[in-house]
Image (cartoon, helix red, strand yellow):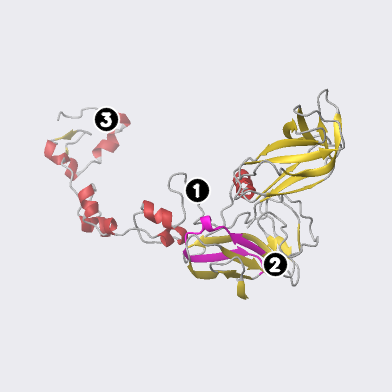
């Protein structure tokens, strides 16, 4: 290695170079470094013990050093990820899965929350605050009234909404069997309401308790359920494992799609909105196909309200006299159904036609595949 004769090397000043000492060589005066050999630059490898305890000497850490340390032998558990730890540990794919983290997408999975519409953001049935909600009837999507009714009040927000369940009323959510991995669960929430649950059943029982609640011995692939009594409620989490996980809201679109597996409502934005296209079976009955944006849990039941009409050739509207219902001639499925509607007269057999709302912006057709 040649002498360094210029103090301007890499922007260093004379003073900078005059201060270089010992192991890098000798100070030769007038800001010149001399007598350096290749051996002066041979790096030293750290040991496993030095990785564990640290060292003030400059050394490099090799894979062998890591393997010889305790760090390499301590893997994080799922609970370490969800609650945190001051101990240095390796995070494996299994630990992430145990914590409820989807390793591929980086999002929380059903292991992180089995509850759908946990923040009461989706309200397809348009439940009105403080309205009577009789036993078994749904308010916000996936939440149905308990045996004594389920009236509650709320102010709807775009984000998570706090509801207040009225005295002597309860709300229940049943978790579908395909979303139950079994074992131990933890139920947690925000608010003053208390909860109870059912293992392997859609009917909760036992005493109510405050958040969080430990649930054990749930059978995989079998329904489970939770029920909340009077008080405020929001941000409900039912996660796999013995540690309560924080509430992690889904995107609105994902929450909406999850809800539509159980209930879909086609509603109007204008007085004349289309519901489905089809053809005339005869002069009084039209049959129309309606396809679902997601596959439903099962073949659904149909409900409807409002005024309907059928557009026939030429664009004229014939008023529907018998409300839309599932076709008796074509089987329903979880992906689409055939709907029939009747008029007094005016259809031509075999002609195409369109089912619409008839000057009624509140008309809707709903499909229910709830548990």
Using the numbered discs, state the Cα–Cα distance from disc 3 to disc 2 in whole angstroms. 84 Å
Q: Residue at x 42, y 59 (%)?
A: 78
Which numbered mark, 1 or 3, is in the foreground of this view?
Answer: 1
* Extreme-bottom residue of the structure: 207
Task: Pick whichever, 96 or 317, lies toward us.
Answer: 317
Element at label 3: loop
Residue 339 position, x and y percent, is: 72, 41
Question: Going 45% across and 57% down the picture, which residue do you hit?
Answer: 99
Going from N to C along the chain, the mark reached first, 1 or 2, is: 1
Mark 1 residue crowding within 10 angstroms, few (<14) / some (14–19) / many (20+): few
Single out the mark in the foreground, 3 or 2: 2
- In terms of image quadrants, where is residue 153? bottom right
The residue singled out by tag 1 in the image is 107
Q: Is residue 183 magenta?
A: yes
- List x then y, in percent, for residue 329: 69, 41
Label 2: few (<14), some (14–19) or many (≥20) C-alpha neighbours in 10 Å? many
- Which residue was labeled with disc 2? 146
- Residue behind mark 3: 7
Q: Position of residue 85 (x, y in %)?
A: 41, 61
Q: Secondary structure at mark 1?
A: loop
User: How far is the residue under mark 1 from the one under mark 3?
Assistant: 55 Å
Of residues 351 and 128, the one nearer the viewer is 351
């Amino acid at each position: 290695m040649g002498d360094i004769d210029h103090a301007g090397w890499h922007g260093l000043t004379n003073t900078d170079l005059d201060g270089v000492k010992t192991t890098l060589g000798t100070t030769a005066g007038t800001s010149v470094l001399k007598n350096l050999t290749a051996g002066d630059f041979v790096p030293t490898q750290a040991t496993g013990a030095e990785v564990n305890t640290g060292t003030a000497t400059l050394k490099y850490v090799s894979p062998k050093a890591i393997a010889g340390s305790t760090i390499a032998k301590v893997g994080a558990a799922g609970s370490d990820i969800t609650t945190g730890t001051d101990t240095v540990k390796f995070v494996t794919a299994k630990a992430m899965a145990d914590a409820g983290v989807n390793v591929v997408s980086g999002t929380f999975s059903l292991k992180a929350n089995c509850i759908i519409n946990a923040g009461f953001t989706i309200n397809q049935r348009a439940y009105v605050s403080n309205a009577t909600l009789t036993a078994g009837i749904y308010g916000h999507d996936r939440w149905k009234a308990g045996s004594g009714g389920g009236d509650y009040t709320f102010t709807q927000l775009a984000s998570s909404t706090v509801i207040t369940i009225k005295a002597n009323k309860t709300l229940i959510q049943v978790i579908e069997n395909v979303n139950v991995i079994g074992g131990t669960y933890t139920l947690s929430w925000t608010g003053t309401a208390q909860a109870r649950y059912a293992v392997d059943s859609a009917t909760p029982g036992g005493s109510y308790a405050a958040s969080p609640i430990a649930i054990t011995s749930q059978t995989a692939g079998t329904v489970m359920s939770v029920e909340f009594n009077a008080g405020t409620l929001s941000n409900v989490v039912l996660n796999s494992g013995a540690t309560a996980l924080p509430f992690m809201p889904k995107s609105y679109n994902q929450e909406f799609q999850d809800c539509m597996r159980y209930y879909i409502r086609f509603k109007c934005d204008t007085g004349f909105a289309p519901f489905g296209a089809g053809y005339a079976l005869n002069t009084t009955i039209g049959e129309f196909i309606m396809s679902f944006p997601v596959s439903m849990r099962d073949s659904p039941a149909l409900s409807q309200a409002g005024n309907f009409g059928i557009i026939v050739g030429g664009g004229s509207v014939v008023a529907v006299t018998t409300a839309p219902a599932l076709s008796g001639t074509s089987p329903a499925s979880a992906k689409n159904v055939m709907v029939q509607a009747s008029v007094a007269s005016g259809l031509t057999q075999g002609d195409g036609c369109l089912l619409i709302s008839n000057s009624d912006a509140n008309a809707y057709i709903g499909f229910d595949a709830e548990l």
